[in-house]
Amino acid sequence: MSARFKLFAIVAFLVLAGGGLAAYKHIVIGIPLKVGKASTEWLVESKITFAAFGEPVSVRLALPTSEITRDLGIDAQSSGYSFRTEADASGNLSAVWEADSVEGPQALYYRVRFPESGVNSAGPVSVSGDLPKAVDPGLTRNAREAAESVVRRVSEFSSSPDSRFVGIFQEITALESSQEISLLKRAYADEDERRGLISLGVDLLKLAGIPARMAYGVRLEEMRGPQEALLLVEYFDGVHWKIRNPDKPTDELRPDQIFVWNRGGDALFEVNEGAENSSIVFTATRDLIPIERQTDLRESSLLVATILALPASERQVFRFVVLIPIGAFVVVLLRNIVGIATLGTFMPVLLALSLLEMPLQSGLIMFAVIIGAGLWFRFLLSRLNLLVVPRVAACVVIVTLLMMVLSVVSWRLGMRDGLKITLFPMIILAWTIERMSLIWEEEGKRSALLQVGGSLFVAVVAFSVMEMRQIRYWAFYFPELLLVLLGGIILIGRYTGYRLSELMRFKNFETAA
Amino acid sequence: MTRWWHRWFRTPAELREMGVVGINMRNARYVLPSNPRKLYDLVDNKVRTKSLAVERGISVPETYGVVTNPGDVRNFERMLEGRESFVIKPTRGSGGKGVLVIAGREDGMYLKPSGAQLSVGDVRNHLQNILAGLHSLGGKRDTALIEYKVAPEKTMTSISFQGAPDIRVVLFHGYPVLAMLRASTRESDGRSNLHQGALGIGVDIRSGKTVHAVHHGRAVKMHPDLKVPLVGVTVPEWERILEIAVQCYEMTGLGYLGVDLMIDENRGPLMIEVNARPGLAIQLANGVGLLKRLEPITERRAKHPGETPAERLLFSKNRFAPIQEG
């Protein structure tokens, strides 16, 4: 029985190690075990990357205004750099990092945190002292004529700066642009199309006598992952500076959707000649535990902090990665204890992962349509007597095309979720189709449908477990609990009892004579 | 004693009482400890199994040829000079997957037992699929085995709808524990897979007489299509069948194995393949839980280690004789 003893010793060790670490985090550091309701927070992280080559480097990042930052949790990670924040005459803050000699790829981080409801970073700001004046944008003659005629047209219908702002950006974003706008668009063509249009809008506003400048925001969307700064427009309505998103000129900015990182017209970030290839990305993530705890945790030893010691942009990927073992555990349970047959062992986990990215219903419809249509094509292909690998490759192409068609069709029908199906595991789907058609031929359609149905069922169960808020919280903030899960999987690996399906399979069992 | 829930399921306690072995138990207690991984290739590779069997004098269907690379597919007919019927199998296939039986030829076409016609191109395509690994475990590249098609013995064909039943003997450490016939029905369409509607017919180890039969897990007395009795049929050359099965244990060294055989009209019992993880349906076919047979063997081996094949055969025959029906 020493093998048995070893097994239990290993399982006990795993449970103790995982459970112990989790208990330490809970009791000593004080991280709640249950996912909180109110204490969720947004963490917005900016990450500046560049390559240095041994010369003095100085990096300046424009920051959210001081009124906002006063109440926010702030954190700048900058090992090897001297760091300070500076305020200019008009009160605009910026962060400055300096280093004498650094080499190779560099990354600097600046983070702010605020409650989930958002902070009103886009509110109107009043001006002290002189009122700002619109500066003439200085256009070429042709462009100026066109621009003036647009401004005249807009001014006929609107008098206030607000309505002129709306009018100008509606002209620019209209599907069929007027002759003048087309000409101007060509003059303002930029590598970044949106930036070109916005600088056109800003200049038109100035021409209409409204002071205007660019501002930078971050979308509060977790799924987006690392994102570029969102360009916004700030304009002066005679009393206040206001901010709007030129994509939706009529709407005020919603603080729970967009965080304005910087306003005031300064450059978002500057890197001196000591560096090359600089760029900035933002990551918005929602943290489910309070700031103080989070800081405590990050500063604990690596063993305790684990993935939480990573910057938000690197950590983001783990939101899904930590869920994969949970999906695998569900598969183990459903196969070895319940006894559901699936096509391919872990295909359901991959399917569940892709379901996480879209509403369940449309995900399942997509799956059914792709498998159904794919099978039909597979039967057509089988008449051509192709070899196996080319046949599966042909299936991959067909699956890809099907997804494109589905995306376009669902977009046309106004279902925006359709676009996300690109994350569907295509190769896996192609193999699923191939294997299903084989089973169909060899064991009949009942068996094939049963196995696909089984896979789908397992995928949906895995999806619903992986989607539970509490489970995600545990997986992400207590990743050491995966050791406990491992212990459970090892135990199931030694389970010799009946599967539930066998209780039914042997229901007519009769001891002969 | 029938309970209301027997319409839907049996409780684990009831199954344990009857000695039923589930898949988890089979794998964890019997397959994994008794069958070392390194021996698997002996049985997974049919070409190897057959050549080993021939060395030991176990009768197997004659090999006509092995197609190993796609270039040979065009010339496969050269291997078949003068052969009317043959069987094509993937060398590493399992569970009858990818097996193509050709019963004869007519006007340059090949005929399946059902009478369906295949062109030379169809057969070549089947060979290509086998070589590409379509039917092998994990989709690995494979070779195709072309061999003699068994001419089934008459008592066997009389209880099967098309095609001949095959015989499966399960052995534990070289002791035969359970045996069954698998006979096809109209529903199973020539295939001998129990969950596709084939019949499982339990065979008494001592006498070679059929004792019990099931269709879709339910006990039956008659063949559903042929209306002939299924119980009380004597399997011919039973002694020889058991001998071959025991020799297969000596040959492979697998502690838990299933041996599949067919009886040829002229050549007698032929070993078709050896399976390192035989299924559990044999319990249903016999109406006997495997545990009732496996546990006595474990005890016996503890008390009398290293018995000869003849001694093991004798033990099984005496120990596993069914209680005579009144």
Image: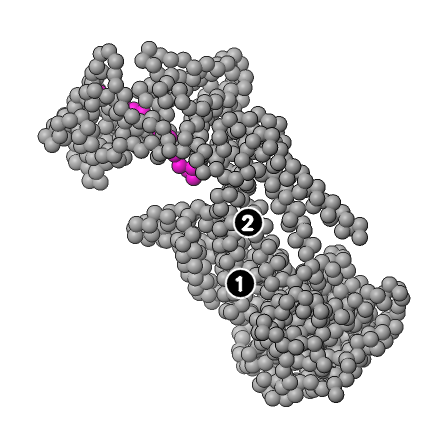
- Magenta stretch encompasses residue A212: yes
Res A287 seen here: yes
Q: Residue at x 49, y 58 (%)?
A: A456
Type of amino acid under label 2 = Gly
* Subunit bearing disc 1: A
- Magenta stretch encompasses residue B160: no
Residue B35 in the image: x percent, y percent?
76, 60
Is B86 rendered above or below residue A14? below
Out of A23 and B58, give the one closest to the viewer: A23
The answer to which image quadrant residue A39 occupies is top left
Type of amino acid under label 1 = Gln
From the viewer's perspective, tell me whether residue A257 is left or right of residue B308: left
- The residue singled out by tag 2 in the image is A327
Q: Residue at x 54, y 40 (%)?
A: A474
* Highlighted range, magenta: A211-224
- The residue singled out by tag 1 in the image is A451
Is A335 rendered above or below residue A223? below
Identify the disc placed on residue B249: none
Q: Residue at x 57, y 37 (%)?
A: A478
Q: Residue at x 56, y 81 (%)?
A: B186
The answer to which image quadrant residue A61 occupies is top left
Dots 1 and 2: beta carbons under 8 Å?
no
Alpha carbon of mark 1 to alpha carbon of mark 2: how far? 18 Å
Out of A230 and B69, give the one closest to the viewer: A230
Residue A189 in the image: x percent, y percent?
28, 30
Is B225 rendered above or below residue A507? below
Is A301 rendered above or below residue B221? above
